[in-house]
Image (spheres, helix red, strand yellow):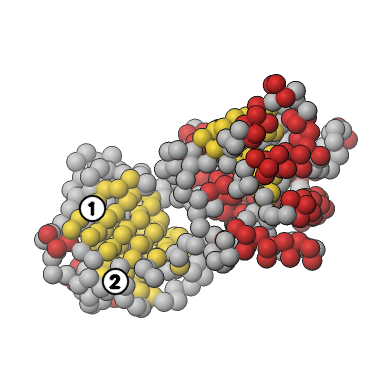
């Protein structure tokens, strides 16, 4: 937990009220934002990355309003560009910017205040985001000196990294609090990239960052310029602050897919969202997010569930089925992992993974937990990656009722995601970002099945993993 001054604590309370409009909740930004970026080589490119993320999130009207890039720059250098060539000033004066993203070379400078005042004067609802940095060479000094370079970046421990960055983070927060006070409102928001980078480095140190073995792999040079993983991490942090919604679950971006797998993409998204919702000056805190999803699996134990099967919670929070010798078949209903309570209308969001030849299923509205198959609806989980013309017994199908409109199943060993919506007799299924089922149960072979019941995961006697299982019910 980072230490904060009293003035920062007061700013936190004010920012929650301002961002939520007094409602106590922060609503996601649904309209595409016009974003202008001013920065150096650690930041100026983020405009294009943010655009890619926004399109992946279905925000088609997001706009890159402009970019001002000056290598090794402070904000004042962007401000001092002659007015006739200063595209940032021109766009702000014309009211063509919804979000201005700025960065400082370590310490904030006068250019940030000048830009913030101009922005607010011409668009009272504008937001200015200020990138919290990570420290190249682990030093606050600028220009950088070779003597500040650590002998071995990979030798830094988590505690050492936190100690190095703490004074910088504290000074940054104090600056933003004072600037917002001078503006008379919260117009400037922190993008806590520095915090996110430290969290990722801690994961690497612990061996929990898929595809990244050493901290030094994050950087393209000794100065600390970001590689693709850090580029996406910064993009996800910016997305969370700009759109006030989680990046978790967004599609794998091409710049990551060339080198890494989905597991790392998900980790970056989770780290970014955690950093943003924990930071008191990001404009969005976890307790004020209007999300309404609640976890069904808590990542610690099987509280709220019943089973006689060998379901275990692994390190990292995933729940895994580890069949015991002699366990096989699908009629051992007591071995299914089944909720203790019933659900009627809901959105169920989850991820699953199976081995080659794997088989499981997600059961919905089970009327009788002694016979899931006869009294509920099953969304099939099966190793059918690459299968042409999948049927209702293949992955993504509603068994006995509807085949997926397309095969979205990933290869065995990779995580898949289902977003399942049950509302009345309507059943919709999204798999890995694509809708594959839109079914009226009342007009299907499953008509007459209960419209309220338990949720269950099938034990077929084969290994299967579930994680990030959460549910949203109507208010």
Query: Total of numbered circles in the picture?
Result: 2
Picture coordinates of residue 11, whole percent (x, y): 72, 61
Q: Nearer the viewer, residue 48 or 23?
A: 23
User: Which residue appears farthest toward the top when viewing the image?
Assistant: 84
Q: Is residue 37 left or right of residue 449?
A: right
Identified at 70% across, 21% down, the residue is: 84
Identified at 74% across, 65% down, the residue is: 10
Sort mark 1 into few (<14), some (14-19) or many (20+) by Cα contacts within 10 Å: some
Residue 468 sits above or below residue 83 on the image: below
Mark 2, secondary structure of its residue? loop
Picture coordinates of residue 167, whole percent (x, y): 82, 53
Sort mark 2 into few (<14), some (14-19) or many (20+) by Cα contacts within 10 Å: some
Viewer can see residue 29: yes
Q: Quarter holding the C terminus? A: bottom left
Q: Nearer the viewer, residue 309 or 373?
A: 373
Picture coordinates of residue 261, whole percent (x, y): 48, 42
Identified at 39% across, 58% down, the residue is: 350
Task: Give the residue at mark 1.
Answer: 438
Q: Nearer the viewer, residue 49 or 199?
A: 49
Task: Give the residue at mark 2.
Answer: 344
Identified at 50% across, 67% down, the residue is: 299
Viewer can see residue 325: no
Picture coordinates of residue 428, whole percent (x, y): 27, 55
């Amino acid at each position: 937990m980072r230490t904060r001054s009293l003035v920062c604590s007061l700013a936190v309370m004010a920012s929650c009220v301002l961002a939520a409009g007094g409602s106590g909740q922060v609503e996601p930004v649904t309209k595409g934002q016009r974003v202008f970026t001013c920065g150096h080589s650690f930041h100026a490119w983020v405009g294009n990355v943010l655009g890619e993320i926004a399109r992946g999130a279905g925000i088609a009207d997001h706009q890159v309003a402009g970019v001002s890039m000056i290598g090794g720059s402070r904000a004042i250098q962007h401000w001092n560009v002659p007015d006739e060539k200063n595209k940032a000033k021109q766009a702000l004066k014309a009211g063509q910017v919804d979000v201005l993203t700025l960065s400082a070379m370590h310490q904030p400078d006068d250019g940030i205040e000048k830009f913030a005042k101009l922005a607010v004067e011409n668009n009272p609802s504008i937001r200015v985001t200020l990138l919290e940095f990570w420290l190249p060479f682990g030093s606050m000094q600028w220009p950088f000196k070779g003597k500040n370079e650590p002998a071995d970046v990979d030798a830094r421990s988590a505690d050492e990294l936190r100690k190095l960055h703490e004074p910088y983070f504290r000074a940054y927060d104090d600056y933003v609090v004072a600037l917002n006070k001078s503006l008379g409102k919260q117009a400037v928001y922190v993008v806590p990239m520095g915090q996110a980078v430290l969290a990722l480095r801690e994961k690497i140190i612990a061996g929990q960052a898929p595809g990244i073995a050493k901290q030094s792999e994050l950087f393209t040079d000794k100065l600390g310029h970001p590689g693709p993983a850090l580029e996406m991490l910064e993009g996800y942090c910016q997305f969370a602050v700009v759109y006030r919604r989680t990046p978790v679950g967004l599609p794998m971006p091409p710049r990551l897919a060339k080198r890494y797998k989905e597991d790392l993409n998900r980790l970056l998204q989770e780290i970014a969202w955690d950093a943003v919702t924990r930071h008191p000056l990001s404009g969005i805190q976890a307790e004020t997010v209007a999300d309404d999803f609640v976890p069904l699996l808590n990542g610690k134990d099987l509280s709220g569930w019943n089973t006689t099967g060998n379901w275990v919670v692994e390190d990292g929070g995933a729940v895994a089925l580890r069949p015991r010798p002699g366990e096989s078949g699908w009629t051992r209903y007591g071995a299914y992992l089944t909720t203790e309570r019933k659900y009627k209308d809901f959105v169920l969001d989850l991820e699953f993974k199976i081995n080659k030849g794997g088989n499981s299923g997600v059961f919905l509205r089970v009327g009788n937990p002694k016979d899931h198959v006869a009294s509920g609806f099953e969304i099939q989980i099966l190793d059918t990656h690459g299968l042409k013309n999948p049927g209702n017994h293949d992955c993504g199908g509603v068994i006995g009722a509807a085949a997926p409109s397309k095969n979205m199943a990933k290869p065995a060993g990779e995580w898949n995601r289902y977003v399942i919506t049950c509302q009345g007799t309507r059943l919709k299924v999204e798999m890995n970002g694509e809708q594959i089922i839109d079914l009226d149960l009342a007009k299907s072979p499953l008509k007459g099945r209960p419209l309220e019941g338990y949720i269950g995961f099938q034990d077929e006697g084969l290994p299967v993993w579930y994680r990030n299982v959460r549910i949203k019910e109507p208010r």
